[in-house]
Image (cartoon, rainbow, N blue to C red):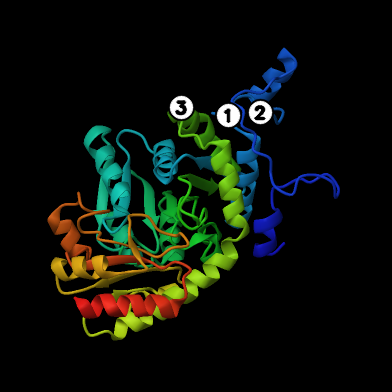
Amino acid sequence: MKTRTLCIHAGEEKEGKIGSINVPIHQSSTYTLGTIDRAIRILSGEEEGFVYTRGENPTTTVLEKKLALLEKGEKALCFSSGMGAISASILSLVKKGDEIVVSHNIYGTSHRFLIYLENNLDIKINWIWHQTPEDFLKATTLNTRLYYLESPTNPTLEVADTPDIVKIAKENRVLTIFDNTFATPINQNPLEWGVDLVTHSLTKYVGGHSDVVAGAVIGSKEKIEKIHQETYKLFGSVLSPFDSYLLIRGIKTLPLRMEYHNRGAEKLANYLYRHPIVKKVNYPGLPSHPTYNIARKLMKGFSGMISIEVENQEIAKKVMESLEIAALGVSLGGLETLVQHPYTMSHGTMEEDIKAKTGITPGLIRISVGLEDPEDLIEDFAQALNQS
């Protein structure tokens, strides 16, 4: 089945042509097992079944099947947040004394989590400035266990040459985790490039309606089951059945929504690029972007994320507060356009020199382009920029 058909039907078992069109919400913590022998078979993995929702739930299982098929993986596992998925995935692969290579140019909370690992769990982080194959190779040692990637990056939208990075990883027996939140499975599928695990904040584009917080990791059956048996069940970052239902609903329109996010962002980015007050536009679909050629090679669409740089923080503040359609908010990927100030908000706890070197300046504004008419958004940003 092609992508749009998968989004609607994958993972849903309907009995003939009679039954519920929508996946039922199994709002139950516990499931009866019948006999001790059956309980043993289910708990040992010999037989499929449901025991306790901290481990598995029928509604969530449908969501996980959809995600696995969309990302072209064998199995998926859902969490109650994107950071739940990221932290559980990383901690299932590394231990005390291991090393991780990762760029400073990633989501602020992921950055803080990796600093926490280094400061508290004796897991060394080999930081690099850009996600180039050369930088990853240079930072790799005999103790390197994991490469962590995010592409496009948050908030400067750099695109990594992931196939070449994966090749280096495999040559050095290093595993790879890839955060695919910004692009979504519609615009790229990193598992096809040899990545070991793909993570998502499902809160964003997959949910798409700003009404659910969730995360997921997708990969081979072996690696996902390892996470499931270890960090997932022990940490308890479990997605609720109702939130799983909302995400199943969101996935059904994901290809259609991403088509319009892609289009709207491209139109707005081209307008902003020509505006005299805007010093710089970070958008991988613009030829001026430093990773434009890589993005064209690897991505089917450039998603709905843009960041722009104006002269200083005061002007950035005026622009964001003068917008009438776009709203100030920290998330992204919803129907509505949101702006935020990475320097003081999502990446506010980063050290000053790191922010400077990664392009997170006081004048940087991150834009999540929603599904409003692009002409209305252009007019809104025009009046806000002109007022500043």
Mark nearest the camera among 2 and 3 is 2
Amino acid type of the residue tagged 3 in the rendering: Leu
Residue at image coords 31%, 62%: 155
Q: Do the residues under discs 2 and 1 have CB atoms within 8 angstroms?
A: yes
Mark nearest the camera among 3 and 1 is 1
> Residue 114's image quarter?
top left
* 253 vs 47: above or below: below
Residue 128's x, y, as percent?
26, 57
Is 252 placed left or right of 345 in the picture?
right
Q: Nearer the viewer, residue 265 or 64?
A: 265
Real-space CA distance between mark 2 and mark 3, rounded to the nearest whole angstrom: 17 Å
Real-space CA distance between mark 2 and mark 1, rounded to the nearest whole angstrom: 8 Å
Amino acid type of the residue tagged 2 in the rendering: Phe
* 176 vs 298: above or below: above
Which quarter of the figure is the C terminus placed in? bottom left
> Residue 132's image quarter?
bottom left
Residue 53 — which label? 1
Which quarter of the figure is the N terminus placed in? bottom right
Q: Earlier in the sequence, mark 2 or mark 3?
A: 2
Tell me the crowding category of disc 2: few under 14, some 14 to 19, or many 20 or more residues within 10 angstroms, Cα based. Answer: some
User: Would residue 277 be visible to someone looking at this image?
Assistant: yes
Residue that badge 2 annotates: 50
Residue 348's x, y, as percent?
20, 52
Residue 234 — which label? 3
Residue at image coords 50%, 57%: 208
Residue 183's x, y, as percent?
46, 63
Residue 44's x, y, as percent?
64, 24
Residue at image coords 29%, 36%: 97
Q: Secondary structure at mark 1?
A: loop
